[in-house]
Image (tube, coloured by chain):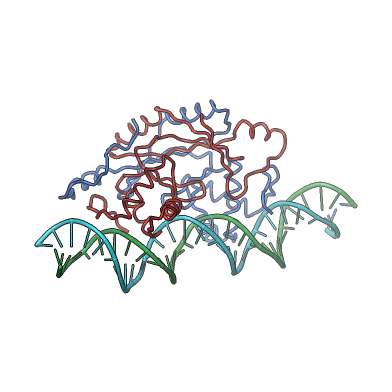
Chain colours: A blue, B red, C green, D cyan
Amino acid sequence: MTDQAGTERRPTRQRAAIARALSASAEFRSAQEIHADLAGSGTRVGLATVYRNLQAMATDGEVDVIRSPDGEAVYRSCSTDHHHHVVCRSCGLAVEVTGDAVERWAEAVAAAHGFTQVRHTMEMEGLCPACTASRHRSKVVRRPTQAPRRVVDG
Amino acid sequence: MTDQAGTERRPTRQRAAIARALSASAEFRSAQEIHADLAGSGTRVGLATVYRNLQAMATDGEVDVIRSPDGEAVYRSCSTDHHHHVVCRSCGLAVEVTGDAVERWAEAVAAAHGFTQVRHTMEMEGLCPACTASRHRSKVVRRPTQAPRRVVDG
DNA sequence: TTCACGATGAGAATCGTTGTCAAATGCGAT
DNA sequence: ATCGCATTTGACAACGATTCTCATCGTGAA
């Protein structure tokens, strides 16, 4: 079977377990992690099932999905506290940030295009203070690469 | 493996070709696509080399990277036009949007935490006008594994 | 030109994710 | 409670993007 209608989904113990595991954390978790969690807590659910349900939930708007920097799909239940991150692309340091500005902007823009039930994800990356410093130290002897500094639109 | 940022890199014809192919388009392109392009235009470059260089460029902040909805890493040279999308999670319709508000917010927030060379990605998803309507009527035929996506200008 | 070492290429190895299909299960009707 | 039947599930194969390996090549410096 190919598509599954969002209207009729059968409740199963597996689906419930997955939903529960998901809402047990406010963090983004990968399908594999959730599968491992369930296995660890004695709930035996097939990996494919975890993937299928997570996808279905995402399609139905029950959970948020983003791809982690290494390409893994990570999920988080929708209702949880919403925030964003600034991640250092050199050392991986992540700082949580929140702000109404983006939330409102996203909402307004989407609405302007007639979209409803809008959700958004935003990730920022750059160099943390420490890495910014160390990068200046190891500065090259030769002429700098053609790397332009201006990156963020302003 | 480890971050080599700041280290000098040798100029090679492959690296140049990749940079050129990248800046030839304002769109996000995958490593595979770039590899195919190069091959198509007679420039023989190994796939692994394309990956390596793209990554290095991203690490050095010369290009932006995001993951496409299906998990592929897609690259775009930095200086090009920056915008975001609102994607319909039911039919895949994608609308381009731009706005200074987010850009400035991201810049400000990151800077407040001492981050430099900050870049960001933001994706919004919801139900497009059509799908919002049809959802109220009956069940919707949802997109297959690969989302059919049309891009409209907004 | 020669040397030392980073860069490249071809293909194997990874690993997250999806497809396959027979068996199990939920639901409405009986 | 039971039957019929479509939806789900689970085990595992299949896939595909990305990374790794390593012998060989190319580049900057002497």
Judged left or right of residue B134, residue A105 is left
Residue nearest the viewer, comparing A143 with A28: A143
Where residue D3 sits, quadrant-wise, is: bottom right
Q: How many numbered badges does the structure rendering display?
A: 0
- Point 46% across, 35% down: residue: B84
In percent of width and height, residue D2 lies at: 85, 60
A65 in relation to A46, above or below = above
Q: Is residue A36 above or below residue B6?
A: below
**Quick one: A55 or B24, which is closer to the camera?**
B24
Image quarter of the C terminus of chain A: top left
User: In the rendering, at what x and y percent does residue A7 appear?
Assistant: 69, 42
Q: Which quarter of the rendered picture does the N terminus of chain A lie within?
A: bottom right
Residue B71 drawn at (x, y percent): 49, 50
**Residue at the (43%, 31%) spot, across then down:** A102
Which of these two is toward me, A40 or A75?
A75
Measured as percent of width and height from the top left, residue A2 is found at 67, 52
Image height check: is B2 above or below B84? below
Residue B133: quarter of image: top right
